[in-house]
Amino acid sequence: MKTALILSGGGARGIAHVGVAQALSEHGIVPDVISATSSGAFVGAMLGYGYQPKDILKIIRETSFYPYLRLGFGASGLLQLQRMEAVLCKFIPENSFESLKIPLVVTATDIVAGEEVYFRSGDLAKPVLASCCIPGLFSPMHYEGRDLVDGGVLNNLPVEPVINEAEYLIGSHCNPFNLDKPLKRTTEVVYRSLILAMHTKTRARFAKCHLLIEPPELSRFSIFDFRKADQLFEVGYKFANELLRSRS
């Protein structure tokens, strides 16, 4: 039976996916295909290439992402992500979907055409980064004749690209609809608004998953809490591990 792992976006909260992957691995579950968007796409690429979850956590912990986020004032976003391509290529030097051991589908949004775009072959870094371009925070990425932004704008749990490729769908969603943490930044308010606008469609996609992993404790974290990588990993790991144990 083929298994698909679907990873949502969520900024720093996407680190919880790494903990989820650790729990799945310990229970003998290795996905045959991964579908992901935004920060989930970064995690999906690393898992697909063959990095173990604890190695991915170490990479996240030891990599300072901020020097790569070039300010883009005067452009259509505050920051530009292009320089992050060097980070991804450092860890996946072949920079191609074909180099992945587990097939990956990355979802981004064409902000001009207003449609979802799926990538699963060719250049890897640019689609992954395009999928992470939160509108208002990052400039759209121009790639293959399209202006691309965060895939979560239209689909923050991309079940559709793999629904006919696997019999068992595992959804890892790291954007709880109820938040305990106050929103302190304008960019957080913008991102939160996107999540709520997608609420109904995301709920419908939950129903398509045979197993949904959504740790409620993630409501305590911001999309910018990258320095809390260990805590985010642990939240994802503990919740997924307990859920899997209860089902075995």
Image: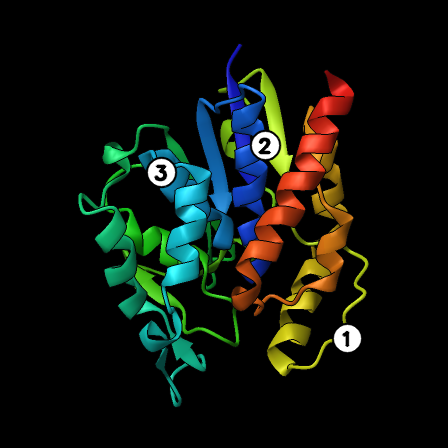
Image location (x, y in percent) of residue 35? 48, 36
| Quadrant in which residue 90 is drawn | bottom left
Tell me if residue 246 can be seen.
Answer: yes
Image location (x, y in percent) of residue 230? 55, 55
In this picture, residue 211 sits left or right of residue 246: left
Disc 2 secondary structure class: helix
Q: Earlier in the sequence, mark 3 or mark 2?
A: 2
CA distance separating discs 3 and 2: 15 Å
| Quadrant in which residue 243 is drawn | top right
Quadrant placement of the C terminus: top right
Crowding near pointer 3: few (<14 within 10 Å), some, many (20+)? some
Q: Which mark is residue 23?
A: 2
In this picture, residue 175 sits left or right of residue 105: right
Tag 3 residue? 51
Q: Nearer the viewer, residue 184 or 22?
A: 22
Residue at the (65%, 67%) spot, across then down: 222
